[in-house]
Image: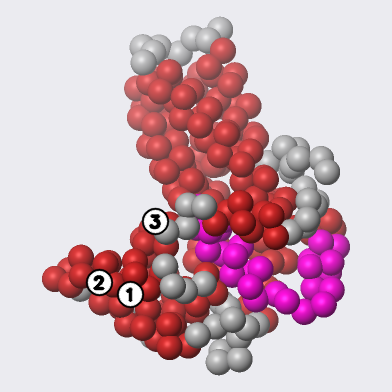
Amino acid sequence: MANKPNVNMQNVEKLTRVLRRLNAEETREQGRKEALELVREINPLELSIAEQQLIEEGVQAEDLRDLCTIHMEVLKDELNKLKSSVEVGHPLYTMIEEHDEILKFLTELDEVNRSVQKTEEYDPQNPGFAKLKELAEKILDAENHHLREENVLFPELEKRGISGPPRIMRMEHDDLRLRKHKIKELAQNVGNMDYDIFKKELNEAVQYLVFNLRDHIFKENHILYPSAFETLKEEGIWEKIKVDCDAIGYCSFTPKH
């Protein structure tokens, strides 16, 4: 990995040591401070490599999820910089815009769930239940977005030795798919269920999906996509990625450019 573009391996080694220490409770706060200082000085690709080194040492991918919150604290203004670095229609630009739409669906889903939780019984005339079905379908319609990542973007990173972050994102995709399908199933079967059980299961699934999918999108926007932009520099590579993405297809909510 020493020949990766724009990578300071000393930064990677320092960050790897600090992230490793975060698993030790007695040094967690000090480690967090050190990690914050380092993250301000490194690029997303260096963070990705540090995460990958930990995975290769045997750290479980699940244990790395929360480490991204450290990076989030200093990356709040970075997304617009990335979008301004690529043209409209660039695969990363499109994926970021799709994320914006998905985040809107999650806000609506959260609001619908809050409304449903206040009701005492199922009323098929309540527009909230039709809205719940609609949102479940829209969120599931993001599948082509995930497939473009899994089948096009991630493999290009993996070919270049960046395997840790794609592995974590794939794992989260699988986890989130289960919740999406659960919400759709509940929306379709509410009339045939005990209503208290329906509300409980809906609340659990929606809260999990809203929190974790927002977190997932933030990590892709601020860590994975910038890493891809830093890594994939060969002439013509993004044109190839665009062709492969076109072959998979887009979502009903993908902005028309």
The label shown at residue 31 is: 2
Q: What stretch is highlighted in magenta?
A: 218-244
Q: Residue at x 84, y 56 (%)?
A: 246
User: Which dot, 1 or 3, sits closer to the camera?
Assistant: 3
Does any portion of residue 58 appear in the rendered image? no
Q: What residue type is labelled 1?
A: Leu
| Residue at the farthest top position | 125
The question of residue 108 being in magenta is answered with no
Mark with earlier residue (2, 1): 1
Q: How crowded is mark 1: few (under 14 residues within 10 Å), some or many (20 or more)?
A: many
The label shown at residue 73 is: 3
Q: Which residue is drawn at 49% across and 47% down?
A: 213
Horizontal arrangement in the rendering, residue 149 relative to residue 13 (left or right): right
The label shown at residue 19 is: 1
Q: How far apart are marks 3 and 2 (CA)?
A: 15 Å
Q: Which residue is drawn at 65% across and 63% down?
A: 150
Horizontal arrangement in the rendering, residue 203 relative to residue 48 (left or right): left
Front-most of residues 232 and 83:
83
Could you say where residue 250 lies in the image, as x and y percent from the top left? 77, 48
Front-most of residues 159 and 47:
47
Could you say where residue 214 lies in the image, as x and y percent from the top left? 48, 46
